[in-house]
Amino acid sequence: MKKITLTILLLALSPLSFACDETCKRAKAETANNVKFASYLNAKYCKSTGLDFLMQGRKSLQNYRDKQLATAHRGGAKNIRNFILQRKDWLQECDNYLTLTEQGRIFRDKESTDKIISAMTGTADELQKIMMRPKSDVESLELVTAPAALKFDELFKAVDAHYLELQRRGLL
């Protein structure tokens, strides 16, 4: 009777001993892909980085687009471009970590992630064009900033679509 009870207990607890936590997944991914992840990277950090971009980063970008983009000021364009590129790097680093450790994607799936990252790249490229345009006494700032405004709108559309999906699923 004791043997049967012990056998049942061992079988019931064995899945727990074979479960792979985040540390285990990290070690497997580092070995399998011959990479060394930064010590601060973990699923919680990546989730908070993604949510911070969805909530706070988007607000900052919207504020710039609404209030400063129309001035086509090179310094502001440079600062916002650097902001976008920095966030893009952080998001890509997290996406790579989550993908290699088989914990999903930074923006839930490949399509959403690629769409948002691509929109960030396009927006940064348009801001670069504003920064590098030749100085001219007579220029229509509206024509200069129109392509960047479209890229901002594309980025906002992608971010908002992902945000709404998360809300519909009850994840926010």
Image (cartoon, rainbow, N blue to C red):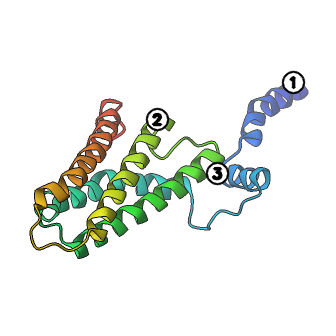
Q: Secondary structure at mark 1?
A: helix
In this picture, residue 167 sits left or right of residue 33? left
Residue at 63% in and 42% down: 102
Nearer the observer, 133 or 34: 133
Q: Nearer the viewer, mark 3 or mark 1?
A: 3
Nearer the observer, 138 or 154: 138
- Residue 22's disc is 3
Q: Amino acid at mark 2?
A: Glu
Q: Are marks 1 and 2 in contact (CB under 8 Å)?
A: no
Q: Amino acid at mark 1?
A: Ile
Q: Is residue 117 above or below residue 2?
A: below
Q: Please tell me how crowded label 1 is: few (under 14), some (14-19), or many (20+) other residues with Cα within 10 Å.
A: few
The quadrant in which the C terminus is found is: top left
Q: Please tell me how crowded label 2 is: few (under 14), some (14-19), or many (20+) other residues with Cα within 10 Å.
A: few
Q: Earlier in the sequence, mark 3 or mark 1?
A: 1
Q: Earlier in the sequence, mark 3 or mark 2?
A: 3
The quadrant in which the N terminus is found is: top right
- Residue 111's disc is 2
Label 3 to label 2, Cα distance in Å? 24 Å
State the residue position of label 1.
Answer: 4
Residue 78 picture quarter? bottom left
Question: Percent x, y for residue 159?
Answer: 31, 44
Residue at 62% in and 66% down: 38
Q: Nearer the viewer, mark 3 or mark 2?
A: 2
Q: Is residue 40 above or below residue 50?
A: below
Label 3 to label 1, Cα distance in Å? 33 Å
Q: Secondary structure at mark 2?
A: helix
